[in-house]
Amino acid sequence: AYLKVDASGDHHPTIPSTLFGVFFEEINHAGAGGLWAELVRNRGFEAGGGVAPSNIYPWNVIGDERAVKVATEPTSCFANNKMALRMDVMCDGASCPAGGAGIVNPGYWGMNIQQGKSYKLVFYLRSIGPVDLTVALIGFNRTKKLAAQNVGGVFTGWTKREVVFKPIMSDPNASLAITSSHKTVVWFDQISLMPLDTYKGHGFRADLAQMVADLKPGFIRFPGGCFVEGAWLRNAVRWKETVGPWENRPGHFGDVWNYWTDDGMGLYEFYQFAEDIGALPIWVFNNGISHTDEVDTTMIGPFIQEALDGIQFAVGPVNSKWGGLRATMGHPKPFDLRYVAVGNEDCGKEHYRGNYLKFYYAIKSVFPNIKVISNCDYTDPSTPTQDPADYYDYHKYTTASDMFRLRHQFDTVPRTGPKAFVSEYAVWREDAGLGSLKAALAEAGFLMGLEKNSDIVEMAAYAPLFVNANDRKWSPDAINFDSYRAYGTPSYWMQTFFSQSNGAALLNATLDDRSSAHLAASAIIRADPATGNSYLRVKVVNVADDPIDIKIDIIGANIDSRFASKKTEITYGGDVMAENTFEEPLKIKPVETELKNPSSKMGVKLSAHS
Ligand code: AHR
């Protein structure tokens, strides 16, 4: 095979600095029980909604029915989430179980409690008489106390209590227990347990946040996906209910992915996370359309106001209503919000285009610099649109061969009009399993096609980003995790090959005709900000069953043995369906070797499926 890379001259097009980013959706417990480091699940006892009795899952009792009983009552001091838990401990002293009777929460399939780290418990309580409670982190088998403290007193009015635990043992499957060995009646609400060492101190689970940051994403799209739409509008995410003090957020049931979220990771936290990982935020808001019901365009006014308020929350001055709320939450400086998306995958719906135009003109009149993303795909002849838009959304889940073929998808798309935002792509189903090498290779070919078409494709993100392996709603996903482990799929590692392309100069990279059925290639050149030196990166993907010898001819650059040169490869012998797992998290990963005798004309062996 033969690849010609033209590095001559200095007028190469620049790849947008946003081209490769990430898409975070609250799916698979990506946020609640994932990136958001809260360890208590259903912390406000609201998971059953605002009527008593409410669903206290996964809270449970310690002790039998003679020792303890619990009930939910709408008597909380928090106006937006009235449900509180009443706990009656009926045993006393020797009649209580060892360690006392009470309540226990295992978090999201076990809390990861580690010796040497600190954990802050915050909770609210009220009692009739004196209470003498033990708050403790307990091991999986409930016999070991990893950390414990006493909380005693009379709490006639709602009182906030804080405890910092320093565990003496580790357990990735721990629980929080609140017990008493004396007769007592006590009410609890808003019980939160967070590790103190979160990513940049902002509440994000450090290992997961770091894995996202390592992709060096140019943008982050959030919070969905279907999560934004809801199966029904009444269950769609409403951003105003996700901001302000965490204790006063009602939480909501995401009815597309079928789980409750306490909304600890709300709109503010998304903007903060974007800032923390150096990515531009892209906010997707509900446009009055769910999977089942729609708001007629004539009545869309309240939804438009909600979107405008959300933009003001991000970029408004501190003396504006919503900018002021942002400031009180800790970020007086506006967030760098430049893009918003009007809905998700709604183009074909009855009221989408009518609603979209109302949103578009309202946003442009109040926030002329905000770029608006339409759901209507300009590459799809079945949904042609002439509507004004800065970008259009393009989603693709398909087979490996189709994804590889789609590297040419944008070659023939008109160069005028809105640019493409490939906000969800992945190989799925039989070719992908839970994340195969085969999927990653086809996706690499697709992304090379996007680099080459980055005059009209400005952003692209794999989807979904995260899965908590205890609740797989969608496969595959780039980052798999449980309470204490995390690994990247081959598709995750594949994306690391592209992170240096953002803002780089794109070189012409041409394969000979015979090779192009099984190979795709692209090349960039850029200055390394760390050293000031320029480097040239040639990427080639081989989807063939056999190794291929390729001759790479770099024109216009004198490359010889004075230059440090490396080859980085992802491959895995012959097994193209191989996956990483918790047991073998790095089975498939990039492997770097020195390139001996680099030159402007060099021969390289490409492994099969690499
Ligand atoms: O990424 C998973 C889902 O796929 C998203 O929620 C939706 O936008 C798409 O259908």
Image (cartoon, rainbow, N blue to C red):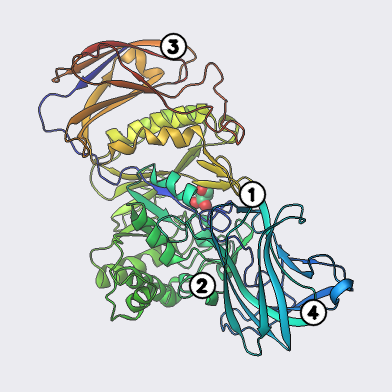
Element at label 1? strand
- In this rendering, the label closer to the viewer, 4 or 3: 4
The residue shown at (71%, 75%) is 133
Residue under circle 2? 246
* Apparent side of residue 92 relative to residue 457 in the rendered image (left or right): right
Residue under circle 4? 88
Element at label 2? helix
Mark 4 or mark 1, which is nearer the start of the sequence? Answer: 4
- The residue carrying pointer 2 sits among few (fewer than 14), some (14 to 19) or many (20 or more) residues within 10 Å by Cα, namely some
C-alpha gap between disc 1 and disc 3: 43 Å
Q: Amino acid at mark 3?
A: Pro
C-alpha gap between disc 2 and disc 3: 55 Å
Q: Position of residue 300 (x, y in %)?
A: 43, 74
C-alpha gap between disc 2 and disc 4: 27 Å
- In this rendering, the label closer to the viewer, 2 or 1: 1
- Quadrant of the image for the C terminus? top left
Residue under circle 3? 547
Element at label 4? strand
Instruction: Confirm or reject: label 4 Cβ below 8 Å from ligand 1.
Output: no
